[in-house]
């Protein structure tokens, strides 16, 4: 058997998604990549890095390759640029933004996916998820890890003690927050030290209130951040941010709270936590697992509330594998990551959501995560990807700059809607001009 044939057999077995055939690299059990070394760069740390490493170990077992995880700094595009300039790019990188894929493709850093990965994508992914990994019709990315970023997790003991129920509208959400506050617990935990959490707040409100068409226009900057629809969304967000008593630690506390702590402080302290609710994606399950709270009993979740006359938003995000070297090893890894077999490994560990429609929901560790996963798959192509992740990374994905910084400033002073809009538009215009020149 040739190496290429063995790799094709590996990809086809992976596409099949299970059985003994899926556990072997080829009909004869050969290891088609024995002796080859593959570097994979990602910004993941802690449990995410550990769980992704388990996926890579399975790939090694099937192929004989040696895969090394390369810790990357955020923004990863800058990290990759340095590596490429130094002549030592990784074979594969996990890019957390659509904008990062577009930027890397524009720099001609990326290699198109091979036929094995393309076949796996066609078999296992909806058209929408395939298109998110493509630039100008060329497929570069394989979305391995997804996120449902339209969720609010809550401490059930606090809700029960306060007599609160899951709100379905923004008006009800604010009323529920007041009810919980009256019971003696601060209602909302906000990880404002990480600016990306604030972009998620804005995006869910904007998608529900302004609608998908406006969302797409703002994501592409075909309307400006000074548009009245942005003012309306910021005003709505200010209904929460403008009441520091409803936020754990107040405004200053939120700005000093990093995302992981915003989750764990919601589920520690029994029925007297620092915050009763925390808005964030399905991946919050990883942080909840670090507390004594049990998902499904101590910790439950409800969809982000509808705003005004809008519908419930479905905002997603994800991490795509891209090849920076056109090697057999890099292409085989992309094909494996597009398979249900690869997704199943991390799904079993929790804190993971796959856009792979052929992953058996039984792979997820509990009913809550199975329901979240089902909602994502059932949405088909009727979702919107994280807006900030679609934008140039200098505006939508850089700590201390652009949208992240502007919304942190807005959290400090939520009355200054016009000022926040002006800063957002100035930074966005600059970022899009720079992207157009690159």
Image (spheres, helix red, strand yellow):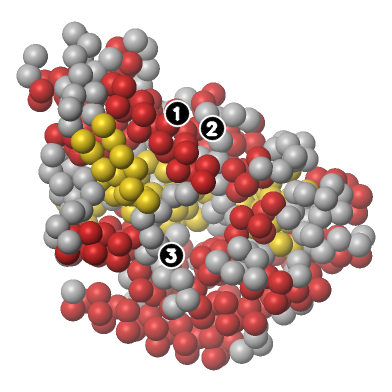
Q: CA distance from mark 3 to mark 2?
A: 28 Å
- Please give the name of the residue rendered at 30% of the width and 66% of the height, measured from the top-left corner: 78
Closer-to-camera residue (14/265): 265
Closer-to-camera residue (296/225): 296
**SS of the residue under disc 1:** helix
Task: Give the x, y percent position of residue 217.
Answer: 38, 71
Nearer the camera: disc 1 or disc 3? 1
- Please give the name of the residue rendered at 32% of the width and 35% of the height, measured from the top-left corner: 337
**SS of the residue under disc 3:** helix
Closer-to-camera residue (200/404): 404
Of the numbered discs in the image, which one, if any, rests on residue 345?
Answer: 1
Q: In the picture provided, is 187 more to the left or to the right than 144?
A: right
Residue 115 visible to the viewer? no
Q: Say whether marks 3 and 2 touch (CB < 8 Å).
A: no
- Disc 2: CA contacts within 10 A as few (<14), some (14-19) or many (>=20): some
Q: Give the total number of marks visible in the rendering.
A: 3
Q: Which residue is mark 3?
A: 387
Task: Give the x, y percent position of residue 326.
Answer: 12, 43
Q: Quadrant of residue 231?
A: bottom right
């Amino acid at each position: 058997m040739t190496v290429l044939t063995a790799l094709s057999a590996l990809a086809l077995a992976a596409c099949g998604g299970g059985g003994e055939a899926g556990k072997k690299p080829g009909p004869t059990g050969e290891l088609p990549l024995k002796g080859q070394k593959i570097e994979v760069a990602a910004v993941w740390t802690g449990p995410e890095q550990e769980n992704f490493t388990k996926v890579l170990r399975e790939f090694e077992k099937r192929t004989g390759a040696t895969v090394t995880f390369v810790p990357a700094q955020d923004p990863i595009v800058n990290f990759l640029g340095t590596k490429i300039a130094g002549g030592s790019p990784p074979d594969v990188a996990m890019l957390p933004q659509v904008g990062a894929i577009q930027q890397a493709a524009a720099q001609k850093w990326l290699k198109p996916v091979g036929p094995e990965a393309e076949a796996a994508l066609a078999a296992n992914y909806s058209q929408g998820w395939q298109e998110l990994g493509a630039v100008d019709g060329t497929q570069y990315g394989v979305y391995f890890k997804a996120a449902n970023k339209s969720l609010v997790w809550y401490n059930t003991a606090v809700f029960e003690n306060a007599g609160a129920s899951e709100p379905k509208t923004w008006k009800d959400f604010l009323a529920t927050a007041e009810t919980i506050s009256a019971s003696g617990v601060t209602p909302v935990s906000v990880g404002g030290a990480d600016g990306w959490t604030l972009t998620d707040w804005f995006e869910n409100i904007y998608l529900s209130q302004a609608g998908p068409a406006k969302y797409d226009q703002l994501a592409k900057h075909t309307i400006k951040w000074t548009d009245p629809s942005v003012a309306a969304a910021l005003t709505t967000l200010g209904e929460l941010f403008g009441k520091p008593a409803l936020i754990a630690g107040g405004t200053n506390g939120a700005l000093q709270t990093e995302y992981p702590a915003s989750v764990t402080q919601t589920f520690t302290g029994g029925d007297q936590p620092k915050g009763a609710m925390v808005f964030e994606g399905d991946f919050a399950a990883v942080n909840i697992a670090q507390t004594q709270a049990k998902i499904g009993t101590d910790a439950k979740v409800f969809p982000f509330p509808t705003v005004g006359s809008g519908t419930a938003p479905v905002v997603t995000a994800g991490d795509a594998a891209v090849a920076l070297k056109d090697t057999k090893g890099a292409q085989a890894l992309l094909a494996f990551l597009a398979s249900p077999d690869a997704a199943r490994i991390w799904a079993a560990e929790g804190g993971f959501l796959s856009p792979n429609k052929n992953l058996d929901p039984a792979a997820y560790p509990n009913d809550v995560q199975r329901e979240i996963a089902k909602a994502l798959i059932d949405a088909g192509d009727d979702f919107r990807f994280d807006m900030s992740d679609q934008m140039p990374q200098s505006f939508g994905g850089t700590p201390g700059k652009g949208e992240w910084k502007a919304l942190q400033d807005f959290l400090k002073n939520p009355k200054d809607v016009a000022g926040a809009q002006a800063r957002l538009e100035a930074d966005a215009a600059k970022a899009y001009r720079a992207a157009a020149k690159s």
